[in-house]
Amino acid sequence: MRAGPPVAWVLNLDSEDELARGALYRPPALAKRAEYAARGRLSGLVRDDDVVLDGDVGVRDDRPARGLRGAAFMPTPYALRRLAESGCEVPAAPSLAVLQRANERSLLLPRLEGARFVRTRDEALLALNRPAPGPLWLCKRGYGAAGRGHRRIPAKKVRDADLAWLDAALRKTGGVEVTPWLDRVADFAQHGTLAPDGALVVGAPTTQEVDAGDAWRASRLARPDDLADAERAALRAALEEAAAALTAIGYFGPFGIDAFRYRASPDQTAFCACCDVNARFTMGFSVGFGALG
């Protein structure tokens, strides 16, 4: 549990929308922000004595936040402005351009056969019309969270509806990740924090419960028998690789990587040590990282 005085939070769980829209982004209504706040509280990031700005439906009262240290799920320009408006202490944060680069799926592609990041319809069609390791390709918008912006597309059988989805995804986020769809049997994560000088503090591996749409449901600390020694080593190496890539572009702050074990054949599994890099807090961060500082 985090020690120290209360913190004022902006739980902007729609931060990927701001990354995609930039200056065109408009924050959601108070009711929606209150919904985000409720979900963020359930993740364990927020203590009982913390203040969540816009945490109640239809209520905006900044007085309890004045003078507190501020924090955001992702420190986007909107989140920083909201913290400043409340009168709390605004944290140092990377620029929007750095946040966009750090969270785009192109930063660190999964080491899976056929993985590509495409920026045009023609590139997407070339990627999707190749032979796939299985029957489907999994496409993800350049920015996305909680399983949003995913679509399974049959290999070599791109339909009109798939093209419409691809066009919209490319227009909205500027790119699409194409990876093979795999039969996942277990999901994991590991988290860290990066100082501006690149110093890395590492959290413990976690197991994740996700639904059929890849949306997070729960996290717990990984038990010794949840991960093989080789998988733990691969997860740690992937975290350090992500940390180096993030530092190289100027990112600092909390981050996490997602990983999974999948069925490679009826009697054999394999491990993907990093399928996503999340340059922000995550819903499972407090589980794997312990003290939030």
Image (cartoon, rainbow, N blue to C red):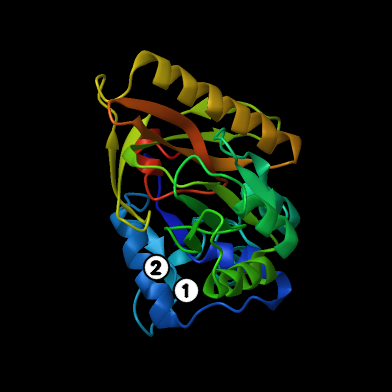
Which image quadrant for residue 31?
Answer: bottom left
User: Which secondary structure, mark 2?
Assistant: helix
Q: Is residue 169 left or right of residue 44?
A: right
- Mark 1 packing: few (<14 Cα in 10 Å), some, or many (20+)? some
- Mark 2 packing: few (<14 Cα in 10 Å), some, or many (20+)? some
Instruction: Indicate which disc, 2 or 1, sits on the residue closer to the N terminus.
Output: 2
Looking at the picture, how far across and down is residue 85, in whole percent? Answer: 59, 72
Looking at the picture, how far across and down is residue 227, in whole percent? Answer: 32, 23
Q: Residue at image x 34%, y 81%?
A: 57
Q: Is residue 32 left or right of residue 172?
A: left
Q: Is residue 113 above or below residue 213?
A: above
Looking at the picture, how far across and down is residue 284, in whole percent? Answer: 37, 45
Query: Of tags 2 and 1, which is closer to the observer?
Result: 2
Which image quadrant for residue 200?
Answer: top right
User: Which secondary structure, mark 1?
Assistant: loop
In the image, 220 versus 8, the foreground residue is 220
Which image quadrant for residue 52?
Answer: bottom left
Q: Residue at image x 54%, y 22%?
A: 237
Looking at the picture, how far across and down is residue 252, in whole percent? Answer: 64, 41
Q: Is residue 291 above or below residue 89?
A: above
Q: Circle 1 is placed at which residue position?
A: 62
Quadrant of the image for the N terminus?
top left
Q: Which mark is residue 4?
A: none
Q: Is residue 153 above or below residue 230?
A: below
Q: Is residue 119 left or right of residue 38?
A: right
Q: Residue at image x 67%, y 43%?
A: 107
Residue at the far top in the pictured view: 229
Q: Residue at image x 60%, y 70%?
A: 163
Q: Circle 2 is placed at which residue position?
A: 36
In the image, 119 versus 233, the foreground residue is 119
Whether residue 1 is visible: no
User: What is the three-letter code of the residue carrying label 1?
Assistant: Asp
